Image (cartoon, rainbow, N blue to C red):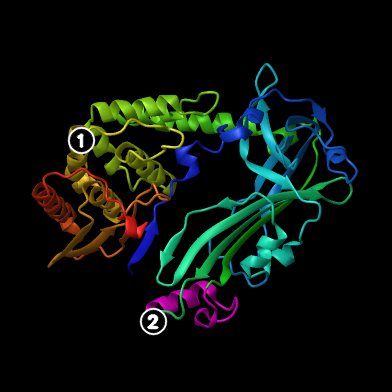
Amino acid sequence: MKKILLLLALVSIARGVCFGTSAFGPDAKFLYEEVFGTVELLDVIKPDAKPLAPGFYKLSREWVGTLTQIEDKQAQTKLPPRQPESLRLNCIRVVPYSGEIELMGAWFDDAGSFSGSGYRRFRFMRKLRSSEEILQTREFDTLKSWFEGFVEYNSGASLLFDEFSYAHGWKVFGLGKNETIVCQDIWAHVSTKMKPGVQDAATRAFFDDVMGDRGPSWKELPVGASIVTIMTFSEGVFRPANPDSEEERRKYPSEYEKHMAWLAKENARIDAHPEPLRSLLDARRTRDKFSELLAYKAAINRFRDKPDPLLIRQLVERLGGDSINNFVEMKMHLEALMDESMGTSYLKLDPWKPENKKIAIKALIDSLPEAPLKDVERAIIIILAETNLVTLKMDEPEFSIDIRALPRTPTSGYYGGVYGSFRIKNELARKTILNRIASELRRRWEASGFCVERYSAPVSEK
C-alpha cells in the first residue's frame, strides 16, 4: 500500500532527550534561574491562592504515586499496553505569561538552580474529566474543547489515501480526595478525512479494522471530520511521600535517580559504537547550559568541511537498528548531516560546499547495499531530494520500486516522499538488488552532471 509520509523532525532527537533541559525564545530565561523558594502544593492550587512569579519552586512535600493505564469497556486500544510507572513529584513551574502551574519530578544543582526534569510535566486543571468521559469520547473536537489552552504533545503525521493521521496528548493534574492529587496522561490518535469516499477495498478494510464500531462509517463522515481511532489513558492518585521510608524510596525513585540510570545505559550504548559514529553521538550527548548543542553543531560542520564516507556508511547500516528509537536516532543524524536546512532555526549549520556535498551524496549511494531492506527507502528519498532526481521507478523480475521525493517548501525543512511500493521477490538477493538500485541512481546522477541542488517546490507550488 503506497503511502505519503511526512518525515517530521522529532523533538527528542533534534533538541534533546526527555531528560534534557532545553528552551528557546523569551521563555528560556525562566528555565535556568535559581529556584524561587519552597511551596506547599495544596496551598498553591487552592482557588484563592495568590499568583506566584514565573519560575521553578521546590515542594515542601514530595508526592508519590503510580500511573496506570485504564482500558475502556470496549477495549478498543490497539497499542501495546503501557507498563505502570511509579513517579516522585517534587517541583512546580509557574509558566511565564499564563501563570499556569506545571507539576514534575526535577533535580537541582549544588547552587539550588533547576538542573533537569523527567519528561512528564502535568499542567494543573481545576476540574478533571473522569476516565469514563475521556475514554468514551470519539470526537476529537470534544477533547480539544475540554483541554483548550493546555499543553499539547504532538506526534508524527502521515497521509494515507483520504486519511490524515496524527496524535495529540495532554498531561494534567488536579485535586483528588482526602488531600491527594490525581494525574492523567491522555493520548488520542486521530484521523481526519481529507476528501469524500475511500479509494479501494483495501483502504476500506483498513479503516474498518482501525475504527471498529467507534462511530459512523468513514465514507459517511463529512470532509474535515476528525475522529479518535485509538485512545490511551493513564491515571494515578498521588499522596504525600513518607521521607523516612526506605521501602517507599525504592518503590518511587526520584527522576534524578532514573536520569542517572538512563545516562549510564546511554553512555554505554554510545561507547559501544565504532568511530567516527561514536564521536558524532558523543557530541550529541554533550550538554551546554542553554541546550544550543554547540558540540553537535561543531561535529556536523566538521563533517561538511571534510566528509567522511565511513560515517555515512555506519549510519545507513544502523537505520533498522533493534528498536524504533534507534532507527529514529540514526535517521535524524543522517538527515542532519545531509540537509543544510536541518536545524537552521537553532543549530545554524554551515552551508554545504558543492564539492563536499558531492562526496557525501556519493558515499550515501555507495552505502545503500548496506541498508536494512525495510528502511532503505528513507535513504533513497534523501538521495532523490539532494540530487534533484526526484523520482526512482524500476520494475525488474526480482523487484520493483516507485519512489518520489517531496519538494522542500518554505514551511517544510524535513525530507518527505511518496514511498511504500518497494517489492522484493527474492530475499536472498537483497544485496544484489540494492546494488542495482545504487547503480541506477549513480548513472542518473552522473547524467545530470552530478547535481547537488536540493529539490524545492517552484514558486507556483509554494
Does the magenta run of residues contain 432?
Answer: no
Which residue in the structure is indicated by mark 1?
354
Which residues are the magenta region? 199-223
Determine the image quadrant of residue 398: bottom left
| As drawn, 226 above or below 100 | below
- Quadrant of the snapshot with the C terminus: bottom left
Residue 299 at x, y = what percent?
35, 26
**Of circles 1 and 2, which is in front?**
1
Where is mark 2, residue-wise? 201
Mark 1–mark 2 contact, CB under 8 Å? no
Give the residue drawn at x 72%, y 33%. Answer: 249
Q: Is residue 67 visible?
A: yes
- Say few, some or many: other residues with alpha carbon within 10 Å of mark 1 (under 14 / 14 to 19 / 20 or more): few
Instruction: Residue at 73%, 42% (x, y): give it.
Output: 98
Name the residue furthest front.
459
Picture coordinates of residue 3, whole percent (x, y): 36, 65
Which is nearer the eye, 448 or 129?
448
Q: Earlier along the polypeptide chain: callout 1 or callout 2? A: 2
Q: Quadrant of the N terminus?
A: bottom left
- For badge 1, the amino acid type reads Pro
Q: Position of residue 344 (x, y in %)?
A: 41, 37
Residue 275 seen from this side: no
- Horizontally, is 101 left or right of 450 in the view? right
Q: Amino acid at mark 2?
A: Ala
Secondary structure under tag 1 reads helix
